[in-house]
Image (spheres, rainbow, N blue to C red):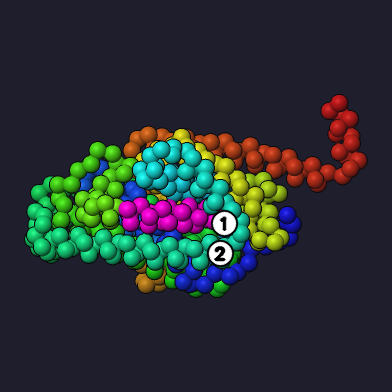
Amino acid sequence: MMENATLVKSLKLPQVVFMGLAWMTPMIYFTVYGVAFESANGQMAGAYIAAFLAIFFTAYSYSKMVKAYPISGSAYAYTKNSIHPKAGFLVGWALLIDYVFSPIIAILTFGIFMNTEFPAVPIYVWVIIMNFILAVVNILGIKFAARLSGISVLFQIGFILLFCVLVAKDILTGGNESSSIFSLTPFLSDESSTSAVFSGAAVICFCFLGFDAVTTMADETVDAQKTIPKAIFWIIFIAAAMYISISYLTQIAYPNFTFTNPDNAAYSLVQLIGGNLLSSLFIMVLIVATFTQGLSSMTSVSRFLYALGRDSILPKKLFSSIHPKYKTPVANIIFVAVISLSAIFINLSTAVLFVSFGALTAFIFVNLSVIAHFYIKLKKRSPKETILFLIFPLIGASFIGWLLTLLDTNTLKFGITWIVIGFVYMFFRTKWSKATERKIMLSPNTQMKLEKHVR
């Protein structure tokens, strides 16, 4: 590999939107259905609305920061440049959980549903196969990955529309406990609980994370300062429309739906609605969806590692290298593929919660970065600018911070432990860097004298 090879700007708005939707994958609604249902106590529509409101203000902050710093690195780059390099490092360290576990979720989901369809083949076999294919496709180039992502997203949206039509048909024909398609029951039932809604929102924020992932592709996006902010809002509005519609309709049609295994609860729901034919189609679409989700996730994390390597947060020689032929960070892709093999040992619920911790932590600091950059440094403080660069990001940071506290205790303990490890790593890395700089500044004669003195 050549160190002077660089990433190529080739992505346009539709490709960025499709990559973002592929990263979050519209079918993620079904992938995390059981986990989200339990967290929200069945109040899925309310939880998705709460998550969307929290995400909207944060997405606004991302759209502003990517204009200020149109480079790969996402929340890490924004915090480093607007607040402080050490704060940026710790945000990047937290964000590693998000990005590293995201392809693991896709690969594990693929294994779970393939095992459901072909019980004779163990999950770990599917995990290994999926991992290998994702690595190869990612190495071949981002434009190829973007094309596959676009096709996959269209298939997923088609399935979701079919799913909604079938559920609406059940409601209208009276084949359920409710006969009206217009109802406030999903939001104002006797069993509604505000705490459950927001607990669910804390988990399902993960379902909107495609808008964050596209900021890692700034170095490969044409006119990133204009393209990525537009893509961010397209992604969250498309996602919100799909997730809230599915939740609303299923809560009206099947208010007493139950399941035993949260990992494949969605499969039970699909069978209830469309029988074996729809469930077979569901598996096929989900296989395609999880493949491209894994593809986009691996793309994002490899570019994030590239940004950390470029800034010498991680070993520069390894993580900032670009393949001269494919123009992709091949070493990073292989590194992620090796880590993703841990999908063999991790359960889906744990992986989703870890991603949520990393993402929510990063979201808080992106909101704070808007305040630091625009309101404090650039002194944009007119009445309108105060709303845009102080009030909006404060609302976003407060809302996300509250959702972060609603994650379960074990997840918070793991996250805090990970941050502490980051502090320790940063301390020793800083000492090593200073010692290296001093050594470089010394003349050869002085170095020889010092070495003699030490001996």
Residues at badges 1 and 2 in contact (C-beta under 8 Å)?
A: yes
| Point 86% across, 32% down: residue | 451
Under circle 1, the secondary element is helix
36 or 384: nearer the viewer: 36
Residue found farthest to the top: 455
Q: In the image, 454: left or right of 69?
A: right
**Quadrant of image for the N terminus:** bottom right
Residue 314 in the image, given as x and y percentages of width and height: 63, 46
Instruction: Tell me the amino acid under the disc marked 2.
Output: Phe
Q: Name the residue under label 1.
A: 137
Under circle 2, the secondary element is helix
Instruction: Judge whether 316 appears above or below 213 on screen.
Output: above
Please give the range of residues in magenta: 280-304
Label number found at residue 361: none
Going from N to C along the chain, the mark reached first, 1 or 2, is 1
275 or 273: nearer the viewer: 275
| Point 43% across, 62% down: residue | 152
Residue 162 in the image, given as x and y percentages of width and height: 27, 64
Instruction: Tell me the amino acid under the disc marked 1.
Output: Val
Q: Name the residue under label 2.
A: 144
Question: What is the crowding at mark 1: few (fewer than 14 residues within 10 Å), some, or many (at least 20)?
Answer: some
| Point 61% across, 47% down: residue | 334
| Point 70% across, 61% down: residue | 325
Residue 368 appears in view? no
Instruction: Judge whether 160 appears above or below 200 on screen.
Output: below
Q: Confirm whether the magenta stretch covers residue 230.
A: no
Residue 204 in the image, given as x and y percentages of width and height: 33, 51
Question: What is the crowding at mark 2: few (fewer than 14 residues within 10 Å), some, or many (at least 20)?
Answer: few
